[in-house]
Image (spheres, rainbow, N blue to C red):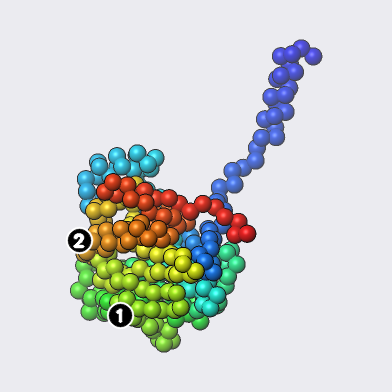
Amino acid sequence: MKLTALLAALVMAGSASAAAPLAGTNAPGFHRVMLGDFEVTAISDGTVDLPFDKLLHQSADVTKKALARNYQSVPTEASVNAFLVNTGGKLILVDTGAGGLFGPTLGKLLANIKASGYQPEQIDEIYLTHLHPDHVGGLATNSQLVFPNAIVRADQRDTDFWLSQANLDKAPADSKGFFQGAIASLSPYAAAQHLKPFKGDTELAPGVHSTSSYGHTPGHTIYTFESKGKKLVLVGDLIHVAAVQLEHPEVTIGFDSDAKSAAGARAKVFQAVAREGALVGAAHLSFPGLGHLRVDGKGYDWLPVTYSQLR
Ligand SMILES: [Zn+2]
């Protein structure tokens, strides 16, 4: 056989076996790290495309340029993360994803909790950073408790605000859904005496406390976990867009109830966690949303956690 004919035969043989379809899915959405004796599992609820050029309180052009420098564009695929912490004494879930409230690309929390090795019945307590739909939607399905044994905790400022029928009635049409989502998600827990709001900074369990960081919502709260000298701060929605708000923490977003307070809360918490070297977990930074903040000029660098086999 001539060389050209041999090559042609090889190419044909190669093409006949190169037809595997694309797999099209990613790894199960959980990522685990240790914090002293506590086991921390970031749980993905999925991702959602958001128009940050329209949502952030700065010119669309400036946002698009910042995203482009970070190899991102608009709309931007944003993560929705929750965190499951096993303290040895309690299994605690912080935030619950969107359930069915925010479109078909979210609502994967329950499947990913199971993939991570836990069952919803095992969860003892649920701490909510705030009552927006992408944080409470996973609590209930058709008015049934998804976490039947869990006590739900949140700052009373948020439960008073979002669970109020009067506030729902007077809300503009385009924001009524936020109130309806919170009411639908939390009412089953209230009816079962499983909703226990707290007021401001509170010790919730050994090594676990809440700290008020009001602004994004009236009762937005961060949660700190401490074990063997290690500290994790779950900052909820203190940041939405790493490509913009790390370099410019002063930039706020349309979802904020009180943008000025939200920016103040971000500045205060970011300074503290960077100074202390605390591990940070964020609801909307790229999954798993776990890493450290390091001061860089007037802003911050984000250092994602490194992978560990937990040996
Ligand atoms: Zn959120």
Give residue 199's mark: 1
Q: Is mark 2 on a helix, strand or loop?
A: helix
Residue type (three-letter) at the residue carrying disc 1: Lys
Q: Quadrant of the N terminus?
A: top right
Quadrant of residue 7 in the image?
Answer: top right
Quadrant of residue 292 in the image?
Answer: bottom left
Residue 113 in picture, x, y percent from top left = 54, 66
Residue 119 visible from this viewpoint: yes
Left or right, 83 with respect to 268, comes to right
Residue 223 in picture, x, y percent from top left = 38, 70
Q: Name the residue under label 2.
A: 260
Residue 180 in picture, x, y percent from top left = 32, 73
Residue 111 visible from this viewpoint: no
Q: How crowded is mark 2: few (under 14 residues within 10 Å), some or many (20 or more)?
A: some
Q: What's the residue at 33%, 50% (across, down)? A: 295
Quadrant of residue 140 in the image?
Answer: bottom left
Q: What's the residue at 49%, 69% (across, down)? A: 228
Give residue 223's mark: none
